[in-house]
Image: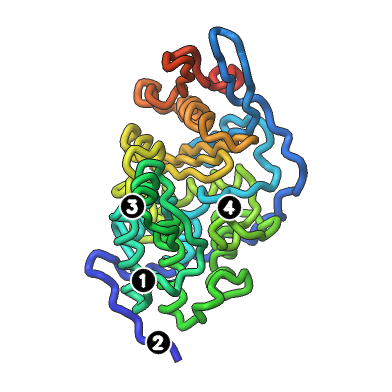
Amino acid sequence: MHPTSPSPSPSAPAPAPAPAPASAPASAPAIREPLHAPVAHLVRGGVVEGIHYGSVVVLGPDGGVDFQLGDIEAAFYPRSAVKPVQAVAMLRAGLPLAGPLLALAAASHSGEDRHLTGSRRILELAGLTEDALRNVPDLPLDPAVRDTWIREGRPPSRLAQNCSGKHAAMLHTAHLNGWTLDDYLDPAHPLQQAVAATVEDLTGRRVARVTVDGCGAPLFAISLHGLARATARIATAPPGTPEARMADALRAHPEMASGSGREPAALMAAVPGLLAKDGYEGVQVAALPDGRTVAVKISDGAGRARGPVTAAALTRAGVDPSLLTPFAETPLLGGGHPVGHIRPAPAITG
């Protein structure tokens, strides 16, 4: 027997039925050492001091590959860049969230008060408390917020961990469907089976491998191309669908999905209609409403190269470069003064 479920908030539309996949997913991407290419140069005093390797894909409005560099078909872990896809799975399963709380369900948040309050509210809607969370306790992701916590002597908590919104939404979804709660992170749990099915539906390919993300949730190995394709489907979905509801929430509340001053939120503010999501280990995906999409993986996981490479890829996709000027280079300091920068490799900029 299903437990009693809270009524959806007035702002949350009735869940649309999940669309049937157009066709069975193709075979899983190959598990191999990715054939990454140079994507960014670290230039100090006019000398290339270092090179970041990685892979980049740019999709056109028709979904075709307009540009690729490196290895876009090898299996890799998209980390938090796949959270919008996970949230779509929850919406398909009846999650009634909308607006800022839905954006938080796909967030890698900074641990600001609004993020903790929002995660707590999602739990309350299911009649749950922080004790139900199974993500790892942590300090806030944002350095300034974290420093404040340390000064105040506050310990790590599950709410402060950057994935708490996703975990709260997973619990809410499980509660609504009458699924067990203690084991909601088990890959065999109905919730995680639904997430895996949505990952395969939106990427168009089978999952290559399942492991555990840093927060404790199942993590699915897909391709960079597949990540771009899934994000494009979310960004271009018809109104009222779970995908469109997810895109609307992220575009309207970018700082709820990241935090004050964070690059994904700033990128969405700079480029009208853009949907952007980052992930650990140098992953970034960004999609425009017409389907133009870029996905980036920095091989060594360096976040400092992610912004310039993403900006260059978006320029390749036709975004006005003047909108991307703040992201085009990462400055390097020497003795407190600018002495160089991290910039995209010529293979991307042409």
> Which of the two labelled residues, at mark 1 and mark 2, occupies the earlier sequence position?
2
Give the distance between the C-alpha atoms of the residues marked 2 and 3, in whole angstroms. 39 Å
Give the distance between the C-alpha atoms of the residues marked 1 and 3, in whole angstroms. 26 Å
Give the distance between the C-alpha atoms of the residues marked 4 and 1, in whole angstroms. 29 Å
Task: Give the secondary structure at mark 4.
Answer: helix
Q: Residue furthest right?
A: 32
Which of 181 and 220 lies nearest the eye of the viewer? 181
Q: Is residue 254 visible to us here?
A: no
Q: Quadrant of the C terminus?
A: top right
> Which of the two labelled residues, at mark 2 and mark 3, occupies the earlier sequence position?
2
Question: x and y percent of residue 275 in the render?
Answer: 40, 43
Task: Give the secondary structure at mark 3.
Answer: loop
Give the distance between the C-alpha atoms of the residues marked 3 and 4, in whole angstroms. 44 Å
Question: x and y percent of residue 163 in the render?
Answer: 46, 57
The residue identified by callout 3 is 152
> Which of the two labelled residues, at mark 4 and mark 2, occupies the earlier sequence position?
2
The residue identified by callout 2 is 3
> Which of the two labelled residues, at mark 1 and mark 3, occupies the earlier sequence position?
1
